[in-house]
Amino acid sequence: MTTTPPIGSALSELDRADEWLNSEPLTAADLRGHVVAVQFCTYSCINWIRTLPYVRAWARTYRDRGLVVVGAHAPEFAFERELEGVRRAMAAMGVEHPIVLDNEYAIWTAFGNRYWPALYVLDGDGRVRHRHFGEGAYDTSETAIQQLLGVDGETVQLEPSGIEAPADWDTLASPETYVGRARGERRIGDGAAEPGLNEWALAGRWTVADESARLEAAGGSITYRFEARDVNLVLTPPAEGAGVRFTVRLDGEAPGAAHGGDVDEHGAGTVDEPRLYQLVREPGTVAARTFAITFLDPGVRAYVFTFG
């Protein structure tokens, strides 16, 4: 466990935040004397979602021992700035600890943060005593919390499931892939032959902006050649709120037992709110396969593929 100088200025940024969920606004003075775990998050991020079982458990287990967990929601995409969207997502994920909206990245900047998710554990004097970036190392982080609280005992033992299950790192061969122009990689031309591994293509009438690609007419599709257990895609429906129907195919066939949590075995699903959609979960041996999603209605926006 390492010790760094006090960063009261970082916690002081909470004093200026006026949009909170699950709590009245918390200030640096309110938190003095408490062990504080600040986790930077954004609700469509699969890496953050997969940490949630542990963060929820720590908040619940150590709340009466002096731990305060604060989620600092720093949006990756513009749609994640909306309070009601964050509120809906946190409720759906069973998040009950305080969440502060950090839309201008003031808290993010005060901590010198660069990652989603990122965990900072501070002692009662506002010193960072432990930090961890990304997923994993849950026992190490919890042990740091226990030591600061003066608590002995086993760390929590969990078996996350569904979208929160850890990635199958041994078979994961496909990287996070952005669809928008600013960070898009490995896109091949429309109408090209089947993509190679980790290549992808759009078909139909799409408008590609910095953050996302928007479908202008029904029948557009995205094809991706991947190798992983899971395929996830961040999607938003049209602003007017109408759902967008879609179908998923794996190697040209309905996914069957390989369907994700947001798709049925026939490959049917609907984009009805802005969030991450789990489209594929392979139940057996993982191998390279071709994924295709076709949207039956216009107006959907696609942001980023993630895998697990």
Image: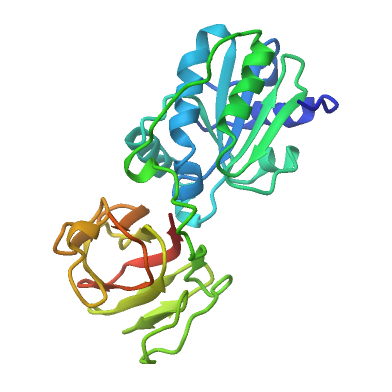
Which residue extends farthest front? 285
Which residue extends farthest left? 266
Spot occupied by residue 92 in the image (x, y as percentages of width and height): 32, 36
> Residue at horizontal 44%, vertical 44%?
166
> Residue at horizontal 14%, vertical 63%?
266
Asked where in the image residue 12 lies, by quadrant, the reply is top right
> Residue at horizontal 51%, vertical 7%?
64
Residue 215 sits above or below residue 280 on the image: below
> Is residue 286 found left or right of 109 in the rendered image?
left
Q: Nearer the viewer, residue 121 or 300?
A: 121
Residue 134 sits above or below residue 67 on the image: below
Residue 204 sits above or below residue 125 on the image: below
**Total numbered labels:** 0
> Residue at horizontal 66%, vertical 8%?
150
Asked where in the image residue 267 lies, by quadrant, the reply is bottom left
Which residue extends farthest right? 5
Spot occupied by residue 206 in the image (x, y as percentages of width and height): 37, 80
Can residue 249 be seen in the rendering of this structure? yes
Spot occupied by residue 308 in the image (x, y as percentages of width and height): 43, 54
> Is residue 156 found left or right of 15 in the rendered image?
left
> Is residue 26 found left or right of 162 in the rendered image?
right
Q: Nearer the viewer, residue 296 or 299?
A: 296
Can residue 23 be seen in the rendering of this structure? no
Residue 168 sits above or below residue 32 on the image: below
Quadrant in which the N terminus is drawn: top right
Which residue extends farthest bottom? 192
Spot occupied by residue 87 in the image (x, y as percentages of width and height): 39, 36
> Is residue 248 found left or right of 213 in the rendered image?
left
What's the coloring here? rainbow
